[in-house]
Amino acid sequence: MTAGKIMFQYERDTMAKIVKMTFERKNTNSAGGNWSFLTEDKNGKQFIIMTPSMMSEAYYGNVSAAQVLVVDLESEKKVAGEGNLTREINMHLAAYKTNPEIKSVFHAHAPNSMFWATSKLNMPNLTESTQKVEFIKVLDFEPNTTVELATVVEKELKEDSRLPRHILLDSHGVLILTPGEDGIEAINKAIQILDIVEWNADIAYKQTVFQKLGILDGYYSKGQKIGTVDDLVAGNEIWNQGTPDEGHE
């Protein structure tokens, strides 16, 4: 636990800054979104640092560190924070408890990814930088904040434990699940994934249009044809399955 005026001061300051940045970058909207990451106290007890309910509708992304919540992972109860606990906590708990390697759960309403989510289509993964998230899948629809949605996410994570993941929630948004040495590293990975997948979502849309116009004969990634519109409609995985590049610009 970091010393400060409030419980987990540094971690909650960090979360408040991330909320503001995400709204300023238009990677979510006033309809909602919620994100969290894990931390622990000096005794090794785990807590969730989480955005409060109504951070979008009421505060438009301008929340203070004091409003950011601290939730006991074991009891699932709020132990600090002026805000209220979002009903979407079900989905976050399902992720953390299904795969202990997950250190951050990031749900947002990023516009380009939402296009694919509302189309009930798996997103073709085409760019070099997004290859690390592999198959970008859309899950079956369940209403937001429900136990049923959390169950759909839990089922997916039991069937496919690969990390990091960028998952589409049908008609609802994106879910990014990341590992890390600690929660702050993990949520920073999630922000980076959100940003690069938004670019990929736009590129995938344009490659789809070019195929229908007859300009392309398939989806291309790193100089290779990796699928077609027929694969898209059939729900097949479309991503470059070669060795991911480790370098950074």
Image: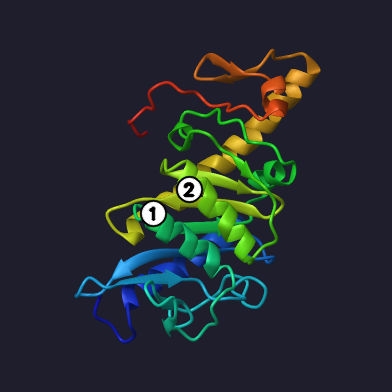
**Mark 2 residue crowding within 10 angstroms, few (<14) / some (14–19) / many (20+):** some
Identified by mark 1, the residue type is: Ile
Decide if residue 108 is in sight here. yes
Evaluate if marks 2 and 1 touch, with contact meaning CB atoms under 8 Å apart. Answer: yes
Residue 210's image quarter?
top right
Q: Quarter of the image containing the N terminus? A: bottom left
Q: Nearer the viewer, mark 2 or mark 1?
A: 2
213 left or right, relative to 156: right
Q: Is residue 97 above or below residue 169?
A: below
Q: Is residue 177 above or below residue 120?
A: below
Residue 132's image quarter?
top left
172 left or right, relative to 185: right
Identified by mark 2, the residue type is: Leu
Which residue is rendered at x = 48% and y = 35% of the image? Answer: 130
Label 1, on which residue? 102
Q: Measured from the top left, where is residue 112 in percent x and y?
A: 66, 44
